[in-house]
Image (spheres, rainbow, N blue to C red):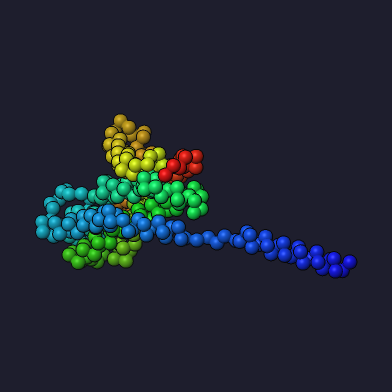
């Protein structure tokens, strides 16, 4: 009897060991995300796009140094550049958020799914195996990081050239009070994060559009048209009821982060709308992609 018991126990233990070998515990890994980020960073057109974004604040700073605009001329913060170099990245962000940064996001998001399908690598990715939900999640996270890269490509060179040409010190806020250089740098970082959040919401729209086609250029153009149309609708007074729900409506509210104290109302409203766009359009992309017949 004891031998049978021992033998049974051994068989059970062996079975448990075999089951453990068959079903190893899966460890969470960032390998797929890192691979996606390397792919985005390695594309020549993306590198050239970052150079264009970085060139704008440099050109603006040199232009202001050569010829200072008069009162009321130029975009927001431009007339304040000479008083503090940190106004250079703020002015550049105010200019580029209208077109250049959304254009960069359009190119990235157009490639997200449609680019893979166009190159014939999408089907290969799904046989690695990678679930469709995970693939979409990684694609979107990489787009969010790309949005932060784009904003940084504007702000960092702008801050460097601004401080080099105009110096720094206490920064005069839009409320008229002054804050120290350290606090001013933190406010610029908040502006960067706020605008990156807006671009991340736009990226979700682009990701959804990218699941509808196998042509990345078509997806990029569609998202750019969406952005331009949003700006146009936001400028029509008769559509004031729609304005709070347009993704671009509160983008320029980043100026409220430069008040003393910070005026959070419009900023929080903008973050809420960005979050709604991100959630709704990512779920729409998932619904479309999870049932899509992958042929390439």
**In this view of the protein, can residue 171 be seen by the observer?**
no
**In this view of the protein, can residue 215 be seen by the observer?**
yes
In this rendering, position of residue 175 left or right of residue 204:
left
Could you say which is closer to the camera, residue 270 or residue 49?
A: 49
**Extreme-right residue of the structure:** 1
Could you say which is closer to the camera, residue 9 or residue 48?
A: 9
Q: Is residue 28 above or below residue 263?
A: below
Residue at 12% x, 51% y: name it: 70
Question: Residue 100 appears at what percent x and percent y?
Answer: 26, 49
**Extreme-left residue of the structure:** 67
Count of numbered tags: 0
Give the quadrant of residue 62.
bottom left
Question: Residue 47 appears at what percent x and percent y?
Answer: 28, 57
Quadrant placement of the C terminus: top left
Residue at 32% x, 46% y: name it: 106
In this rendering, position of residue 98 left or right of residue 22:
left
Could you say which is closer to the camera, residue 269 or residue 285?
A: 285
In this rendering, position of residue 86 left or right of residue 241:
left
Residue at 32% x, 66% y: name it: 182
**Extreme-top residue of the structure:** 238
Question: Residue 184 appears at what percent x and percent y?
Answer: 30, 62
In this rendering, position of residue 201 left or right of residue 22:
left
Question: Residue 165 appears at what percent x and percent y?
Answer: 17, 65
Residue at 28% x, 47% y: name it: 103
Give the quadrant of residue 276.
top left
Q: Is residue 168 above or below residue 229?
A: below
Quadrant placement of the N terminus: bottom right
Q: Is residue 35 above or below residue 223?
A: below
Could you say which is closer to the camera, residue 201 or residue 76?
A: 201
């Amino acid at each position: 009897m004891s031998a049978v018991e021992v033998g049974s126990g051994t068989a059970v233990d062996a079975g448990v060991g075999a089951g453990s070998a068959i079903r190893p515990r899966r460890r969470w890994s960032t390998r797929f995300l890192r691979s996606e980020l390397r792919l985005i960073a390695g594309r020549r057109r993306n590198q050239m796009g970052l150079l264009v974004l970085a060139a704008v604040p440099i050109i603006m700073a040199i232009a202001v140094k050569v010829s200072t605009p008069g009162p009321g001329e130029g975009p927001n913060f431009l007339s304040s550049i000479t008083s503090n170099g940190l106004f250079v990245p703020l002015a550049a962000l105010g200019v580029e958020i209208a077109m250049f940064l959304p254009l960069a996001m359009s190119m990235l998001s157009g490639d997200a799914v449609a680019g893979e399908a166009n190159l014939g690598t999408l089907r290969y990715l799904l046989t690695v195996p990678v679930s469709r939900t995970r693939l979409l999640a990684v694609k979107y996270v990489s787009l969010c990081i790309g949005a932060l890269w784009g904003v940084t490509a504007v702000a960092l060179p702008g801050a460097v050239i601004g401080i080099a040409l105009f110096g720094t010190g206490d920064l005069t806020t839009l409320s008229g009070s002054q804050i120290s250089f350290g606090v001013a740098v933190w406010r610029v970082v908040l502006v960067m994060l706020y605008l990156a959040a807006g671009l991340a919401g736009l990226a979700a729209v682009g990701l959804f559009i990218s699941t509808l086609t196998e042509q990345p250029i078509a997806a990029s153009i569609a998202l750019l048209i969406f952005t331009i149309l949003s700006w146009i609708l936001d400028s029509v007074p008769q559509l004031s009821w729609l304005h709070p729900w347009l993704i671009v409506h509160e983008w320029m509210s980043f100026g409220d982060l430069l008040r003393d104290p910070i005026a959070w109302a419009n900023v929080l409203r903008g973050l809420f709308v960005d979050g709604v766009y991100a959630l709704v359009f990512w779920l729409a992309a998932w619904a479309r992609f999870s049932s899509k017949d992958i042929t390439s």
